[in-house]
Image (cartoon, helix red, strand yellow):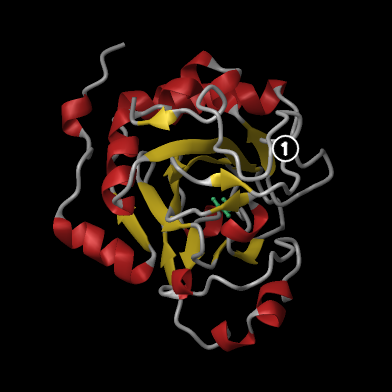
Amino acid sequence: MTIHASQTTSTVGADVVASYRENGFVHIPQVLTPEEVERYRDAARHAYETKAAYNGPDDNTFKQILQLWQTDETLRDLTFHAGLANIATQLAGIPLMLWHDQLLIKKPHNGSATEYHQDAPYWPHANARHRLSAWIALVDVPVERGCMTFIPGTHRWTDIRAVDLHDRTDFSDAAPDVTYLPRVTVPLRAGDCTFHNAYLAHTANPNDTDDFRYAFVNIYVDAKLTYDGRPHPCTDGLGLEIGSPLPAEHFPRLPQ
Ligand SMILES: O=C(O)CCC(=O)C(=O)O
């Protein structure tokens, strides 16, 4: 299949970088061609039907499938997508590696939002100068299909505890001062993505439509960060010492 990489966005201007750094997120339209979207969506559907959920079968929020790059040749291309990794590097301003990828699939009428949270408090990292996610829409994601909402500026709040993203009020309990800050909801077309800082507070609506919401997420982190010893499915069993760097065979440097 021909991938028309030149038709898609793979670098961004200084204004986009400045907006990302100010707000903690940015919407990048059309990072994938329609051909890429179709190929990755088909692979995501297949993964939904054949792979186990990391979060178990009873969690209605979404089906979370981790580390597709290790098990699916097609989705591996999306994890290693050069345009996405180039933009992530521009936004972060430092060399990056992959922390992990994931599919987050909300089935039709799932009835559950992904409640407000920050990502960084869940991760066993020390000395991270920057971490960010690319949230890539593999279908059109209007508000009612479970798009993301961000609280601009909250990426500067780096001492909020990890919260339960199934609990409607846990984030506001943990950070009551955030309650009255304005929010920005970002519906996406298939092939668009948002990048968000790992400390930016965000939520995603329930999927109230008759169609699946397929989102693929690449998480890029400071290539020089170290392991802090806490448990996590992506580091458990690797025998890492506290303070050691993350090995490139499990956490590849990107772009390659
Ligand atoms: O897609 C969702 O439901 C939530 C995504 C999210 O929290 C993330 O990518 O950090």
Residue at point 69% right, 78% down? 174
Number of residue marks: 1
Classify mark 1: residues with Cα within 10 Å, few (<14), some (14-19) or many (20+). few
Q: Position of residue 39 (x, y in %)?
A: 43, 21
The three-letter code of the residue at mark 1 reads Pro
Can I make out residue 138 in this image? no
Q: Which residue is mark 1?
A: 233
Residue at point 73% right, 30% down? 239
Q: Is residue 41 left or right of residue 171?
A: left
Residue at point 47% right, 28% down? 252
Q: Secondary structure at mark 1?
A: loop
Q: Is residue 83 left or right of residue 12?
A: right
Q: Position of residue 12 (x, y in %)?
A: 19, 48
Image quadrant where one finds the N terminus = top left
Q: Is residue 246 left or right of residue 55?
A: left
Question: Considering depth in this image, is 104 or 170 the residue closer to the camera?
Answer: 170
Can I make out residue 243 in this image? yes
Q: Residue furthest top?
A: 1
Residue at point 32% right, 34% down? 32
Question: Considering depth in this image, is 91 or 188 the residue closer to the camera?
Answer: 91
Q: Determine whether 101 is above or below 186 in the image.
A: above
Q: Determine whether 175 is above or below 46 in the image.
A: below
Note whether ligand 1 is within 8 Å of mark 1.
no
Q: Position of residue 227 (x, y in %)?
A: 62, 44
Quarter location, residue 187:
bottom left
